[in-house]
Image: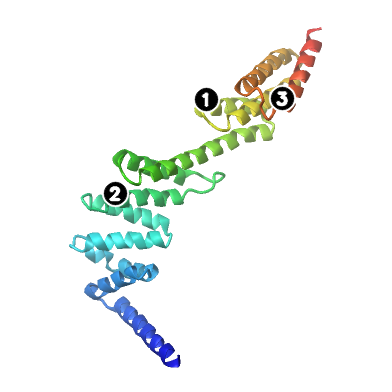
Amino acid sequence: MNKLVALFLLVFLASCSEYQKALKNEDVAVKYPMAEKKYEAGKYNKAIRLFEQIAPSYRGKPQAEKMFYMYSQSLYKTKQYYLAGYQFESFASAYPKSEKIEEAAYLGAFCYAQLSPVYSLDQTDTYKAIDKLQAFIDNYPNSEYFPQANTLAKDLREKLEKKAFEIAKQYNTIRDYKAAIIVLENFISDYPGTPYKEDALYYKFDSAYHLAINSVEYKMKERIEIAKEAYDKLIKFNSETKYKKEADEMLSRLNNDLTQFSK
């Protein structure tokens, strides 16, 4: 057993020594095969160090296409999505006739999608990812990656939709009811098929309700009528809405106030 361990250590140390020599060697012809060897062995971080060293010297060479593909894949495998996305895009641009072009185009877009943050943060990277995915979908409608690209784009759009709803809802939360009515109506108009429509209709009604009951006298009647219209839209959308109990209670208050106001 000790002999086997010793043999393993010798092989391991020799391998490390060989890798270190390649890193320090100025000859790219020495670095390339070592980079490929580490790539094939799944030692992507080690491969990346060598690819970074030889990339500038390999542009335009016959081996460049394979080298840049392995470099891009190594970055992707180590989840360095920003760099991987850039490298895949560069690869697709530099080698439009490559048999790997379709895969590179998809993985480039996929990498940008991985950079998309949670909905509550700035969504600049989400918009970029959607653009990249849509470009792939348009360019490769028959691709094997088409379903995945469509699903990713759909998920990212839903994230933007959720953020838009939460922003609109926030006006209701902070009791800026005038703004809430406008922003929620805009949200409903911009996203007619949204899964948040019922919620948006309710918060619009809730905002109109609070604006009406806290209104100055000369504006109260008009605002009560506007609030009742908002209630009608909510019930028309879903007569058994999850907000029905609260909505009916608010409607009763509105009707009572309207009756008192009319006397």
Between the residue at mark 2 and the residue at mark 3, the CA separation in whole angstroms equals: 52 Å
Q: Is residue 112 above or below residue 221?
A: below
Between the residue at mark 2 and the residue at mark 1, the CA separation in whole angstroms equals: 37 Å
The crowd level at tag 1 (other Cα within 10 Å; few <14, some 14-19, many 20+) is few
The crowd level at tag 2 (other Cα within 10 Å; few <14, some 14-19, many 20+) is some
Q: Is residue 9 left or right of residue 252?
A: left
Residue flagged by tag 2: what amino acid is it?
A: Glu
- Residue drawn at x 71%, y 16% as measured from the top left: 224
Q: Quadrant of residue 233?
A: top right
Give the mark nearest the N terminus, 2 or 3.
2
Q: Say what secondary structure mark 1 lies in.
A: helix
Between the residue at mark 1 and the residue at mark 3, the CA separation in whole angstroms equals: 22 Å
Q: Quadrant of residue 246?
A: top right
Give the residue at mark 3. Answer: 247
Q: Position of residue 216 (x, y in %)?
A: 75, 18
Is residue 98 visible in this depiction of the protein? yes
Give the residue at mark 1. Answer: 189
Residue flagged by tag 3: what amino acid is it?
A: Ala
Closer to us: 167 or 62: 62
Q: Is residue 224 above or below residue 81?
A: above
- Residue drawn at x 35%, y 54% as measured from the top left: 86
Q: Position of residue 45 (x, y in %)?
A: 39, 68
The quadrant of the image that shows the N terminus is bottom left
